[in-house]
């Protein structure tokens, strides 16, 4: 065995000490795994400064948001000389430079993961904040003294820093910094020096110190001075001892570590990975005694630090949408061995960590994807092999790389999923799923691809599939679901269209709850989904009318239809009055033996193959919508100003009104038929079926509810409006 291999094995063995000796079973376990990967990355791949020990390097927070692509003035450092009898500022009291890969460890930055605008970090190096801060505030922040002067006037007096100052052999360094902070003239000189040195007005920066300890020695960064590192660690330990306690009671005690399972001294309840167990959310602990916080979520001190470090790592592993972050955290499904860790680190962690937010979803999918089996897809779709091969060939030419599907059946990985709104106070965690249901996403994507191909090749909805992005056979459904976007364009996003006062994400936001159900493998409530669909159609139609075009949103209806059928065909839709499953026979796709199908035959096939249209009342509503759609298309051709669908929008359809609406629509059809020479049976395929089904029984005794009627009516309108393709008609009368 080579020396390099031996060193690598020893390093892996060292970092795995932080990971529980069992298969991953909680988000805390995931945190330990990713923290171990981060530590391994620093120690194995980074050039460790000679002036820093490996332990310090592994604990430092890297402020990735400040790593510059150009000049950024991202470090502001006070320069202090402690080599003489009394502490003093250097001849050049302030230095400004960029935060880079070369100095990122030397600053000894240790972040407070739940830092607010008024909070300070654990280390003497402090981050100015997420937005730019003006130079005068950095020089002297009179409100909280958080920045340049605060490195001397505030930080050395923190409990953790004072404790180390009294116990560490080099504790005098902290005392000297505090003494310099008591020199008002020196502090005013320091602030004035910054204002006179820089030529910019504001910046985002790490505010820190550089210290000379020996005559003619170099100025050292805080990370190069062990006592300052220890003080930062102690400040962090002091923070953990506070736990989630809201009183002065001691938040520590003897117990069993939540992760390690070992007995001993434990720290007060951790606020959790993203603060979801913080003191602002005590309702998450039904029997929480705030005076004994250490009983609620006990962590061994070392483990608590590991979990906290994960807070600076997790933000490399998410995709964002509508103010919500969707964290996707793969992990091995078996117990971690050195070999498994090495594979995970190389093939998963480094691959995802280095991806930008826009690339992250693609990288996640590629970890699990596989090429679609053409023969298997043909068997499921009943479509001809030639049609599918031609379709896939077109995708290849367009650079799509062929169809792929998200495959979770034969993989060594699972994925932990979280959806989080970090901008809220406290942080809201909407979905917390330890094992995303990859299998259900695989089936859903296959069903969606199958339906999309059928719709595109059959032209059931004309060229609507090609003209919109609401249904795309090549759409990465799993990617859209994991990113929270798959339903967004087809549902109403708020139950109250007039309520714009609260735009913050909430747990009951439909696009969040629907995506959450799917990643858990749970069924979507069919009644809720239909209600969201109909509300979306009504809003879109109303908006179109107010904008002056009055166009019915057929594209939205088509997108809803595709999602509904895909969900139903994969058993991801709950039971309701209507079964929405559909099995295309393939008759629309293979015309080599049947010849061009008439629109009469196509309508017959469509009704027969959709279980939602199995009852006379469902067919009646759909056919009424289809006739309205046909007549609306005719009115567009004739430049009629107020279209029939505007006179009878989906919102007007109820059990009480549908008979009257049907009579008016059929009268309008007859009027237009008389106007058109030789077309006395205009739209016969709709009219004859509609008369038969409507007479079956009184609408007031139908089992359909109002929202179901309105959505089936909308589907009919979208179908009828598109029922104008180049398929030949059997006779003029059948038109």
Image (cartoon, rainbow, N blue to C red):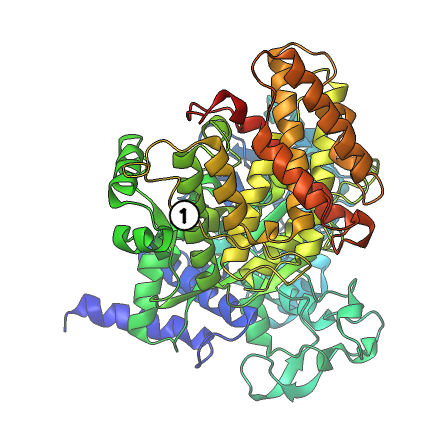
Q: Residue at x 51, y 24 (%)?
A: 724
Hey, which quadrant is residue 303 in on the image? bottom right
Residue 98 visible somewhere in the drawing: no
Front-lying residue, 682 or 577: 682
Q: Is mark 1 on a helix, strand or loop?
A: helix
Front-lying residue, 153 or 307: 307
Identify whether 581 is placed above or below 286: above
Residue 619, percent from left and from top: 64, 45
Instruction: Name the residue tied to disc 1.
Output: 450
Q: Residue at x 40, y 33 (%)?
A: 597
Front-lying residue, 238 or 79: 238
Residue 144 visible somewhere in the drawing: yes
Looking at the rendered image, the quarter that the N terminus falls into is bottom left
Q: Which residue is drawn at 74% across and 21% down?
A: 545
Residue 616, percent from left and from top: 66, 50
Residue 600, percent from left and from top: 50, 34
Q: Which residue is drawn at 78% across and 79% down?
A: 250
Identify whether 730 is placed above or below 449: above
């Amino acid at each position: 065995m080579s020396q390099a291999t031996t060193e690598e094995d020893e390093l892996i063995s060292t970092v795995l000490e932080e990971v529980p000796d069992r298969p991953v079973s909680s988000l805390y376990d995931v945190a330990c795994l990713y923290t171990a990967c981060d530590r391994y990355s620093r120690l194995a791949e980074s050039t460790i400064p000679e002036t820093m020990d490996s332990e310090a390097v592994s604990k430092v927070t890297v402020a990735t948001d400040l790593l510059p692509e150009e000049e950024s003035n991202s470090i502001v450092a006070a320069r202090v000389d402690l080599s003489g009898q009394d502490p003093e500022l250097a001849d050049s009291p302030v230095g400004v430079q960029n935060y880079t890969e070369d100095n990122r460890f030397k600053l000894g930055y240790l972040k407070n993961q739940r830092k607010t605008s008024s909070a300070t970090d654990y280390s003497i190096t402090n981050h100015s904040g997420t937005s730019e801060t003006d130079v005068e505030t950095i020089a002297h922040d009179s409100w909280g003294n958080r920045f340049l002067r605060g490195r001397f006037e505030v930080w050395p007096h923190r409990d953790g820093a004072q404790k180390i100052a009294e116990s560490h052999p080099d504790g005098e360094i902290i005392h000297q910094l505090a003494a310099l902070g008591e020199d008002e003239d020196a502090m005013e000189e320091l602030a004035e020096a910054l204002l006179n040195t820089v030529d910019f007005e504001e910046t985002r920066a790490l505010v820190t110190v550089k210290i000379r300890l020996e005559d003619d020695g170099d100025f050292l960064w805080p990370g190069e001075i062990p006592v300052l590192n220890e003080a930062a660690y102690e400040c962090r330990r002091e923070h953990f001892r506070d736990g989630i306690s809201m009183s002065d009671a001691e938040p520590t005690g003897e117990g069993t570590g939540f992760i390690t399972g070992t007995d001993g001294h434990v720290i007060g309840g951790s606020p959790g990975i993203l603060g979801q167990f913080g003191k602002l959310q005590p309702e998450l602990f039904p029997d929480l005694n705030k005076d004994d916080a250490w009983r609620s979520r006990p962590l061994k001190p070392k483990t608590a630090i590991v979990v906290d470090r994960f807070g600076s790592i997790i933000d490399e592993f998410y995709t964002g949408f509508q103010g919500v972050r969707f964290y996707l955290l793969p992990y091995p499904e078996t117990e971690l061995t050195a070999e498994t860790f090495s594979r995970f680190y190389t093939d998963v962690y480094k691959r995802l960590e280095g991806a930008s937010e826009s690339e992250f979803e693609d990288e996640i999918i590629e970890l699990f994807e596989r090429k679609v089996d053409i023969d298997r897809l043909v068997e499921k779709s009943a479509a001809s092999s030639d049609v599918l091969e031609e379709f896939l060939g077109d995708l290849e030419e367009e650079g799509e790389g062929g169809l792929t599907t998200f495959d979770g059946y034969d993989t060594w990985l699972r994925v932990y999923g979280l959806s989080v709104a970090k901008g809220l106070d406290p942080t809201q965690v909407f979905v917390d799923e330890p094992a995303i249901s990859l299998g259900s996403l695989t089936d859903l994507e296959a069903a969606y691809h199958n339906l999309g191909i059928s719709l595109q090749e059959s032209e059931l909805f004309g060229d609507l599939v090609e003209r919109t992005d609401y249904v795309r056979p090549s759409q990465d459904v799993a990617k859209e679901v994991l990113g929270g976007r798959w339903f967004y364009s087809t549902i109403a996003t708020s139950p109250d269209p007039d309520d714009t006062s609260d735009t913050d994400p909430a747990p009951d936001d439909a696009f969040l709850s629907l995506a959450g159900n799917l990643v858990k493998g749970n069924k979507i409530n069919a009644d809720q989904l239909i209600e969201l669909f109909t509300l979306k159609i009504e809003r879109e139609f109303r908006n179109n009318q107010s904008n002056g075009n009055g166009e019915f949103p057929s594209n939205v209806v088509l997108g809803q239809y595709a999602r509904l059928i895909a969900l139903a065909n994969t058993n991801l839709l709950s039971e309701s009055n209507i079964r929405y499953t559909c099995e295309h026979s393939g008759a629309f796709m293979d015309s080599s033996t049947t010849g061009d199908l008439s629109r009469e035959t196509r309508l017959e096939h469509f009704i027969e193959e959709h279980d939602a249209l199995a009852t006379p009342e469902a067919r009646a509503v759909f056919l009424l919508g289809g006739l309205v759609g046909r007549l609306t298309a005719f009115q567009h051709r004739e430049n009629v100003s107020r279209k029939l669908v505007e006179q009878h929008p989906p919102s007007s359809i109820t059990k009480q009104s549908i008979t009257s609406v049907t009579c008016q629509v059929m009268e309008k059809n007859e009027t237009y038929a008389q106007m058109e020479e030789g077309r006395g049976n205009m739209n016969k395929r709709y009219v004859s079926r509609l008369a038969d089904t409507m007479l079956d029984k009184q609408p007031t005794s139908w089992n359909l509810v109002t929202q179901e009627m309105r959505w089936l009516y909308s589907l009919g309108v979208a179908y009828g409006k598109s029922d104008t393709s180049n398929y030949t008609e059997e006779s003029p009368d059948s038109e």
